[in-house]
């Protein structure tokens, strides 16, 4: 079974900082087109933090009413007081949610937000 995917593109995948653009709709995962033309939802070599941190997957989930979750499976960078930062932006350019990843083990991190406008996320940025 294939996952519902919305493709994001970036000129700086695999680097810190970085930005990717696309159109993530509720229920879908962020996908990346690989060099062989196939699409993957494994983002671990595309959205990275310094010192070994990475993002495995990102999904936008409609929970109830006007509420949504950005579910991010990720591991933060190693070292004392290091963190990976992700920002998610609505299609109108305003910031919808942000996440700091401190934990170095791979875990699912959830950010909730509410909106009366389109919840689609069109830009993701990452940094340390």
Image (cartoon, rainbow, N blue to C red):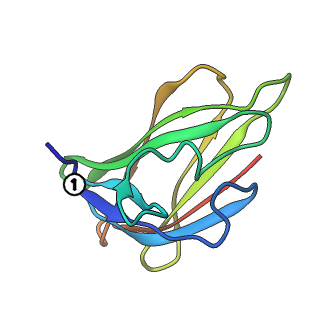
As drawn, which residue projects farthest toward the right? 80
Q: Based on the displayed image, in which of its 4 quarters is residue 13 positioned?
A: bottom right
User: Which of the image's four quarters has the N terminus?
Assistant: top left
Q: Based on the displayed image, in which of its 4 quarters is residue 30 positioned?
A: bottom left
- Camera-nearest residue between 68 and 35: 35
Instruction: Tell me if residue 114 can be seen.
Output: no
Q: Is residue 78 left or right of residue 20?
A: right
- Dot 1 lies on which element? loop
Question: Residue 116 at what x, y percent from top left?
Answer: 29, 67
> Who's the residue at 43% across and 43% down the image?
57
> Who's the residue at 62% across and 39% down the image?
54
Category of crowding for the residue at label 1, using alpha-carbon neighbours closer than 10 angstroms: few (below 14), some (14–19), many (at least 20): some
Question: Residue 73 at what x, y percent from top left?
Answer: 46, 34
- Camera-nearest residue between 90 and 108: 108
Question: Residue 15 at what x, y percent from top left?
Answer: 73, 56
Q: Based on the displayed image, in which of its 4 quarters is residue 49 positioned?
A: top right
Classify 11 as above or below 1. below
Classify 57 as above or below 11. above
Which residue is denoted by mark 1 in the rendering? 4
> Who's the residue at 52% across and 77% down the image?
93
Q: Is residue 11 left or right of residue 34?
A: right
Classify 54 as above or below 93. above
Instruction: Tell me if residue 47 can be seen.
Output: yes
């Amino acid at each position: 079974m294939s996952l519902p995917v919305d493709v994001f593109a970036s000129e700086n995948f695999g680097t810190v900082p970085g930005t990717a653009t696309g159109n993530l709709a509720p229920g879908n995962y962020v996908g990346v087109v690989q060099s062989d033309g196939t699409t993957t939802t494994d983002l671990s070599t595309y959205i990275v933090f310094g010192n070994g941190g990475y993002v495995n997957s990102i999904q936008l989930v409609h929970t109830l009413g006007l509420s949504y979750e950005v579910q991010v499976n990720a591991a933060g960078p190693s070292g004392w007081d290091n963190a990976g930062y992700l920002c998610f932006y609505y299609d109108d350019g305003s910031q919808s949610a942000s996440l700091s990843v401190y934990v170095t083990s791979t875990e699912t991190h959830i950010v909730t937000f509410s909106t009366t406008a389109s919840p689609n996320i069109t830009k993701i940025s990452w940094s340390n």
